[in-house]
């Protein structure tokens, strides 16, 4: 009998929730899989030992090759933590207000997606509270799709749902932006826990604690991830950061110096695009800030 293929929905301590033939099961890594894989993550496609199908706990024999892996740097620590595998798109969720959006944080998350070769987009939630115009303005030159939505009123939810069908999407963004609330709006009956924004710090309190992949009725999956307040960039070679800003593309290879980092070098084609308004000044500012951070990192991060 060949080994059935399941998909990991989430990791709960040492065991995994697995979707197998449309049914949710529990499984653990065994044998070769346990030795070779440090950790399977949401989105991993896994082979199951058929002799365990009748048991309460399935044995995962193999974690199949990943087409992509989204990783996050461990806060203040060393190394990275995988968040989700086989991801088709990263949707950066930010609120139009409450918590106050930080465009630079959005840019960092888009860079993380680009560095992992995963297409990105931005969701501006809570448009019932404030206009999305400032964020639209910030991203205008970037080319990234921007969805304006409200989990509370349902505005924009149909268009967002349509963008998710048939794909594996990851919702990422600061705590309290409304990632879980949006999923509840997209998929009624889901009942994900949502948290009140703490009045003191005006941000969420990490209501979602583990990355969880949710199957959509219309096909596709969304991974709900825990929010955070900082995003470390890592494992990006500083010379390749310019490739993580899609609007820089027309200038790549056009600078006077081949090793131009687009800071103050003469004849820089990226800065020329900034002057012409084809690259937003704030986006360019985010590039410089992340570049400075990457240049300051110790060797092991490169
Ligand atoms: N006014 C308004 N409030 C919203 C909207 N979406 C979510 N909220 C509220 O924002 C708060 C945080 O929502 P969550 O869905 O828990 O946010 P999250 O991004 O999942 O947060 P973490 O799980 O901590 O990362 C809750 O009080 C929601 O009711 C919206 O569209 N409009
Ligand atoms: Mg949440
Ligand atoms: Zn340049």
Image (cartoon, grey):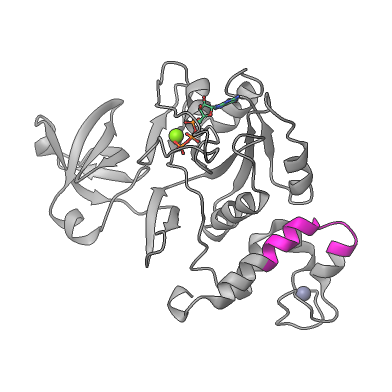
Q: Residue at x 53, y 27 (%)?
A: 182
- 45 relative position to 288: left or right: left
Q: Kindly give the residue lying farthest to the front in the view shown.
A: 200
Taking the image as four quarters, which one is ligand 2 found in? top left
- 172 relative position to 75: left or right: right
Q: In the rendered view, tell whether residue 291 sits above or below residue 27.
A: below
Q: Residue at x 84, y 56 (%)?
A: 278
Residue 292 among those drawn in magenta: no
Q: Which residues are magenta?
A: 274-288
Q: Main secondary structure of the magenta part?
A: helix
| Residue 239 image point, x, y percent | 62, 75
Q: Nearer the viewer, residue 131 or 257?
A: 131
Q: In the rendered view, tell whether residue 80 sits above or below residue 91.
A: below
| Residue 259 image point, x, y percent | 70, 82
| Residue 27 image point, x, y percent | 19, 39
- 276 relative position to 34: left or right: right
Q: Residue at x 37, y 65 (%)?
A: 77
Residue 287 among those drawn in magenta: yes
């Amino acid at each position: 009998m060949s080994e059935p293929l399941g998909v990991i929905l989430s990791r709960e301590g040492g065991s995994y929730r697995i979707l197998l033939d449309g049914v949710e099961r529990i499984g653990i890594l065994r044998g070769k899989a346990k030795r070779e894989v440090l950790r399977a993550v949401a989105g991993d496609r896994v082979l199951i030992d058929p002799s365990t199908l009748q048991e309460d706990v399935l044995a995962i024999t193999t974690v199949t090759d990943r087409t992509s892996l989204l990783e996050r740097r461990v806060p203040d620590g060393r190394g990275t933590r995988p968040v989700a595998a086989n991801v088709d798109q990263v949707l950066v969720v930010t609120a139009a207000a409450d918590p106050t959006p930080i465009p630079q944080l959005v840019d960092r998350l888009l860079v993380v997606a680009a560095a992992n070769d995963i297409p990105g987009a931005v969701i501006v939630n809570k448009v019932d509270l404030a206009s999305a115009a400032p964020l639209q303005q910030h991203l205008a030159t970037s080319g990234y799709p921007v969805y304006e939505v409200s989990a509370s009123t349902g505005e924009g939810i149909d268009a967002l749902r349509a963008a998710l069908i048939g794909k594996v999407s990851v919702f990422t963004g600061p705590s309290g932006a409304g990632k879980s609330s949006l999923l509840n709006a997209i998929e009624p009956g889901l009942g994900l826990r949502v948290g009140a924004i703490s009045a003191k710090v005006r941000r969420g309190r990490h209501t979602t604690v583990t990355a969880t992949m949710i199957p959509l009725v219309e096909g596709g999956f969304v991974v709900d991830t825990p929010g955070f307040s900082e995003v470390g960039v890592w494992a990006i070679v500083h010379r390749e950061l310019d490739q993580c800003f899609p609007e820089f593309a027309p200038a790549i290879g056009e600078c006077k110096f081949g090793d131009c980092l687009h800071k103050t070098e003469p004849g820089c084609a990226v800065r020329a695009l900034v002057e012409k308004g084809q690259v937003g000044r704030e986006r360019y500012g985010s590039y410089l800030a992340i570049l400075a951070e990457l240049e300051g990192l110790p060797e092991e991060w490169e």
